Image (tube, rainbow, N blue to C red):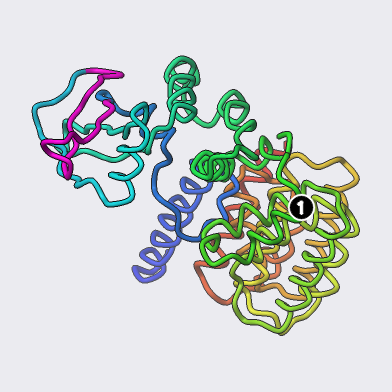
Amino acid sequence: MISGFRRIRRSKILTTALTLAWIISAAPSMACGFHTYLPEKTAVDLILGSEHLVIARNSGASRFTYTPIEVLRGTAPAAKIPQLVDVVSRRKLSANPDDGVLFAYDAVQNNWSLVAYLTPEYRTFVKMVMDSGSEWGDGYPPERLKLVEPLQTHPEPALRSLALREIDQAPYALLRTMDLQIPVDTLLVDLWAQNGYAYQPIRILLLGLTDEDTARAELYDFINRMKHWDDAQNLGPISTALVEIDGDDGITRLEQTLLSDSTQPLNKIEAVVEALAIHNEFGSAALRSTIADTMTRLVTLRPDTAPLIARQFGSRQDWSLARTLEPVVQNRMLSNTQDFLEVAVYVAQGRENLK
């Protein structure tokens, strides 16, 4: 007979395991989101998601306030636009009578969002989004990326910035198919610009798509510096870009520099493992074999990395490492119950899906 204590303990373990299994099985295929702070929505998001879109300007009688002059979608709600016209916008609007400012109205929140300052070129882009966006459906379709690709080197800074922000939202598998037009020198200069800090992850990822030696040198230097840091910031995109640009050699460099060093903090190891999990989704058979061998050596050296491997690969519904992690479960190599269960659930899911 099972004692009451053991019965309760097993019940808690079962409940935790089922919860972890649900989390892993319900997790969506993840986009490549190595973000520092960025605005929650892009201009394209606001254009697509707003029922009411208006173009506004100020006038001589009220040069500090915006008044709708044209409705692009929905109606011009009675609620006044509370944003004031700043000095720079007043000067630009006064000098350019064809310009305007795009606002979106949220009827639920009863507020206005400033979407963008509209030059004629930006207005043309807004029309393109409105014309084609209704067909995009959920997620981030290739058509959306194709629409912003020509803006990468646009003469208007606002449109170049929008393109970069949009590219940053694309899933990595889609990102690597894009026609990159930004010169490597520009990426490298902007990488360290003060106003480009929030865009460092996407610029790093784009370096990996260039196949340029100057980009390689920057990535190698990144990895060498980060070996001595506890901070893992940007290590995910750096690792992803390194594998993109160097393939197997990039994985070898990551292993020799970081993964084989048992003193490296787990947060840094997880950033590298996340990059390898991303590449394992669409890499060649040879690349996936290299990743599997690397993960086998890692978990043999450090069994405490098994939970983070299960987490990163499991969140992508990738069960290819189930047999690699199986000895950790069979030999009870983890003392922490939650860590053990996370790995056990991944192995169980793998057995089920690899039948």
Q: Which residues are magenta?
A: 54-74
Q: Is residue 346 above or below residue 81?
A: below
What is the number of callouts on the image? 1
Residue 231 horizontal/vertical position (percent):
59, 77
x 62%, y 65%: residue:
234
Residue 3 colored in magenta in the image:
no
Residue 6, image quadrant: bottom left
Tell me the element at label 1: helix
Q: Nearer the viewer, residue 165 or 299?
A: 165
Left or right: residue 211 compared with residue 302: right
Is the residue marked by circle 1 packed among few (<14), some (14-19), or many (20+) residues within 10 Å? many
Q: Is residue 25 visible?
A: no
What amino acid is found at the position of numbered circle 1 in the picture?
Answer: Val
Residue 55 sits inside the magenta stretch? yes
Q: Position of residue 352 (x, y in %)?
A: 65, 40
Left or right of 74 in this view: 311: right
Query: Foreground: 20 or 138?
Result: 138
Q: Is residue 290 above or below residue 259?
A: above
Q: Is there any visible trace of residue 218 in the rendered image?
A: yes
Give left or right: position of 302 versus 18.
Answer: right
Determine which residue is flagged by label 1. 184
Q: Whole-percent x and y of residue 343?
A: 61, 60
Instruction: Answer above or below: position of 299 versus 162.
Output: below
Which residue is at 40% across, 55% downward? 15
Rendered image quadrant of residue 9: bottom left
Measured from the top left, where is residue 222 in percent x and y?
A: 74, 71
The N terminus lies in quadrant: bottom left
Which residue shows up at 73% across the image and 39% down it? 180
Q: Quadrant of the C terminus?
A: top right
